[in-house]
Image (cartoon, grey):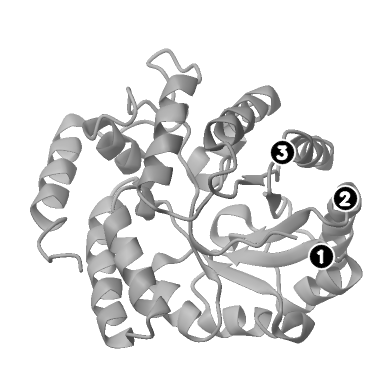
Amino acid sequence: MNNLYGITVPVITPFGEGGELDLQSLESLTEYVIRSGLHCLYPCGTTGEMLLLSIEERKQIVETVIKTTDHRVPVFVQAGAMNPKDTLALARHAYEVGADGIGVVTPAFFKLSDRELIEYYGEVADSIPEDFSMYLYAIPQNAVNDINPMVAEEIARAHKNVAGIKYSFPDLSRIQQFMLINDGTFSVLVGSDELFEAAVAVGGAGTVSGNSMIIPEHYLALWNAMQQNDFELATRYQRRTNELNSILCAKNNIAAYKIMLREEGVIQSSAMRPPMTTLGMEDEKELIQALSEKKYKEVII
């Protein structure tokens, strides 16, 4: 089975000014991420505005990313949806079109019991081949539902294709508990960028980071320092990414990503899917100026 590792990019979904998918910009973005040296792509995640997309749109996005990537880096598709029927359809579609695996966010809005979560993930895992990797995905600050280590362990022990978890709440104690599952072979990635270094230092597999799309050289410098066991240098870069990320996430991080990618000529428009909107002109100017002033303040080595 395939595992996520290093710096995984939950790519944004480009839209035209009329609200339609901009698949040409998505191809450009995919090429940009690969050229930047980042390790894996993760379309239709939170950063991709997944719950504001139709099922058909999500399938188009996945097919475009996989075709453009052409096996150069792994592609894991976020298949979680608002109801189990759609999740099962998206999971199967990801397998059929050649994804390397899937992530599945918890159901949202309605609070579920541990047993309901175990049964939900079990149904998804059973719907795909045993050698097709699946990651649990918890972001309780957005989705209401959380995954605790006991739930994750029961799911992983019963389903061999459940390879790990993307955990997006900043709880390092819980993150380390996940790392004990299946005798320490359970793959754990963090969604909280400020925990990237700390999580990897104690055995984590990496991060799933939207910020890395905008400052890839800083994330790669941090990753490479950790691979060389130079944690003094890694700490410098962790603090540096924290500083830059505070600029990117000051107002609306997804809107900020799109503005900066548009400014770099990677995508055509910074349009968002309603009800979300892009930043106002003054906020946009402040973002571009602040990031431009600080992005290359420290030389990357």
Q: Residue at x 66, y 66 (%)?
A: 165
Callout 2: few (<14), some (14-19), or many (20+) C-alpha neighbours within 10 Å? few
Can you say which quadrant of the picture contains the C terminus? bottom left
Q: CA distance from mark 1 to mark 2?
A: 26 Å
Task: State the image quarter where residue 163 is shown.
Answer: bottom right
Q: Residues within 10 Å of mark 1 (few under 14, many from 20)?
A: few
Q: Are marks 1 and 2 in contact (CB under 8 Å)?
A: no
Residue hosting label 2:
129
Q: Which amino acid type corresponds to the residue marked 3 in the rendered image?
A: Gly
Q: Nearer the viewer, residue 176 or 132?
A: 132
Vertical position of residue 255 compared to residue 292: above or below:
above
Residue 113 — which label?
1
**In-image side of 112 versus 77 (left or right):** right
Please say whether residue 256 is visible from this viewpoint.
Answer: yes
Mark nearer the N terminus (2 vs 3): 3
Image spot of residue 8 (x, y percent): 50, 56
Amino acid type, label 1: Ser
| Residue 57 rendering spot, x and y as whole percentages | 62, 24
Residue farthest toward the top in the current orientation of the protein: 18
Counting residues from the start of the chain, the first of labels 1 and 2 encountered is 1
Residue picked out by circle 3:
98
Is 97 situated left or right of 234 in this image? right
Horizontal and vertical percent for residue 61? 58, 29
Give residue 88's quadrant in the image: top right
The residue at the point 41 percent across, 17 percent down is: 16
| Mark 1 residue element | loop
266 or 67: which is nearer to us? 67
Nearer to us: label 1 or label 3: 3
Residue at horizontal 30%, vertical 48%? Answer: 214
